[in-house]
Image (cartoon, grey):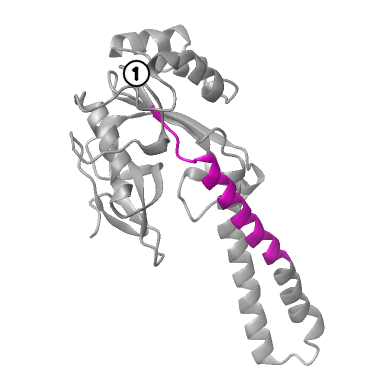
Amino acid sequence: MTSKYRPQIPGCIGDLNKGPTYLMGADNRLLYTNDNYCVFIRKPKIEQIGHTLGYLLAFICLIPATVLVSLLVFVYNTSHDVKIEIVSISALIGCFLGFYAILPELYQNLFTCRGAPIIFNRKTGKVYVNESYFYNFKFLKNPLTYLHPSKKRIKEYDWAYLQGVVVHNFSRYSRNSVILMVCKPHTHKTIDHILLDPLRVGVGSYLVWGWVNNFMCFDDLIDLNEGKYKTDEELQFKKEIIEGQGWPDWMVEAFNATTHDELANIKQKYNIEAS
């Protein structure tokens, strides 16, 4: 099924509707929630370690492969056999494309800290992210971005302009991700992407989306003590997850804003341009 949001990202299965739903499950991704905001992680530590090791192994294996193919093209093919040259050059191009594809995934896992939390404030309708630059889901990257592996994007988004899309991972294990498409106001034109829920099997990929929607709709089904940190453990949560990760002071204060006027006052206090 194609998406109504343009441009689409590869593997799109279909769009998700906002509103209260009874299909939900916070799983171990819910870190903390109170009456104002909830926090989900998108990189559980065990998955992050596994992915890092996998991409690191692939990267290491590509190095000798690239060296051997380069030697075959430029040193050992003294007879200049056309068939050998074509195969070798094709393999060399494949190696470079492999580096181009693997490095963003390796960077993303190496430089993602404390699960890359995403915060939803239901009273102001704002969403906050602080994440690796390589979460942007763009395949055609400027090569200069590879020189800044630890670069982050720290942004505030409007929930009203974030639209959920389910994406298939193209494997036989049928695992899906939920992506938030950042749309221009009142259009279906996407200008950015945010990962909400990483790879899950089958219906499991819809559970976090359901939980977030119920929370943003103030649904009574939501249990505010369902996260890793209980509602009265906000200070502990912020100390262990938020502090030292580059979150701006105004944004941390804005997590708990209860009205748009209060949010505007916080931004004015820190000389932040209102969005």
Query: Mark 1 sits on what residue?
Result: 34
In the rendered view, does 40 fall on the left or right side of 123?
right
- Relative image position of residue 161 (x, y in whole percent): 28, 35
Which residue is located at x 31 percent, y 51 percent? 166
Which of the two residues, 263 or 106, is positioned nearer the viewer here?
106
Which of the two residues, 121 or 182, is positioned nearer the viewer here?
121
Which residue is located at x 35 percent, y 59 percent? 11
- The answer to which image quadrant residue 232 occupies is top left
- Relative image position of residue 227 (x, y in whole percent): 39, 27
Q: For the magenta stretch, what is the residue range?
A: 39-63
The chief SS type of the magenta part is: helix
Which of the two residues, 158 or 273, is positioned nearer the viewer here?
158
For the C terminus, give its image quadrant: top left
Which residue is located at x 18 percent, y 37 percent? 21
In the rendered view, does 10 fall on the left or right side of 81?
left
Type of amino acid at the residue the image marks with label 1: Asn
- Relative image position of residue 146 (x, y in whole percent): 63, 48
On screen, residue 14 above or below 136: below
On screen, residue 150 above or below 77: above
Q: Is residue 233 visible?
A: yes
